[in-house]
Amino acid sequence: MRPTKSLSALATLIMAMVFGLLLSSPAHAAGPAYVALGDSYSSGNGAGNYDSASGSCHRSFSAYPYLWKNAHAPSSFADTSCSGAVTTDVTNSQLGPLNASTGLVSITIGGNDAGFADVMTTCVTGSDTTCVNRVNTAENYARNTLPARLDATYNAIRAKAPNAKVVVLGYPRVYTLNVFCVGLSDTKHRKIDEAADVLDSVIAARAAAHGFVFGDVRNTFNNHELCSGDDYLHSLVISPSWESYHPTATGHSSGYYPVMNAIS
């Protein structure tokens, strides 16, 4: 056989082997088994596109857990988050899908324990003094009572999902400050934002103590709070009223999802 023919045959054989390897190589592995837990900021209350089967839990297909699921194709996915949930609700009724095979858990929780809904109602309907006093009560709760409740919930998650990466997402500030805004006073705006900072600091500290990853969404919501002119949050909604002061679909896609995606 002439050298040129030998080289040609060798090249053909190599190419055949390469194509064979490419065709036989496995597809990309599925993402980790993922379970979403938490309250209305997890379920997507306010994002529209609701799963009718979720009832008053108001789970949205536009919420950050579904956005992550659609982008990463986890090997399995369960969403037990529910609007209005407090820490004990997570522990008592949301942990069913967790097991030793769970690879990723996400959660927002603690806002309802601290009385977020009542804070907003009080500040919308009451005086500056009444608002400030109610926020002070919520902050004291967050600092002194909430840590133990978070610890119990985080311990329960770890016990049920010992191998999972747990992503704890915080809450955004509600108002952009130092701008003209019809509605609540500047005093109320500042005090409500202060409460968000207190709540996030407590949640971040307890998440770190358990080896969980904290996702701070205040940066992605920066300049997109209420009064910004490019709001990622609903203001007061008449109907359905439960969407008030919750992230919009854009709040989930541009506020929560980028943080979740970056740290998961």
Image (cartoon, rainbow, N blue to C red):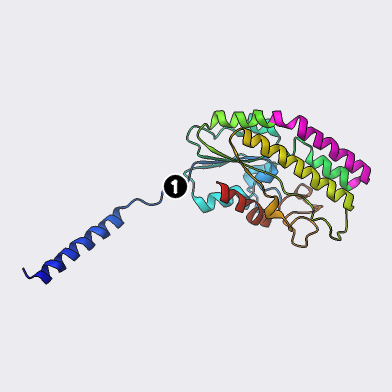
Which residue is pictured at 84% across the width and 58% down the height? Answer: 178
Q: Looking at this view, is 121 or 129 the one in front? A: 129
Q: Residues within 10 Å of mark 1 (few under 14, many from 20)?
A: few
Taking 26 as reference, is 3 left or right? left
Which residue position holds label 1?
A: 30
Q: Quadrant of residue 157?
A: top right
Residue 205 sits above or below residue 10 on the image: above
Q: x, y (%) of residue 206?
A: 66, 34
Badge 1 amino acid: Ala
Q: Image height check: is 22 above or below 69? A: below
In which quarter of the view is residue 220 placed?
bottom right
Magenta span includes 179: no
The location of residue 79, given as percent across then percent down, is 59, 42
Q: Residue at x 7, y 70 (%)?
A: 2
Q: What residue span does the magenta drawing correspond to? A: 125-149
Residue 263 vs 176, above or below: the answer is above
**Residue 166 on image: x %, y %:** 57, 39
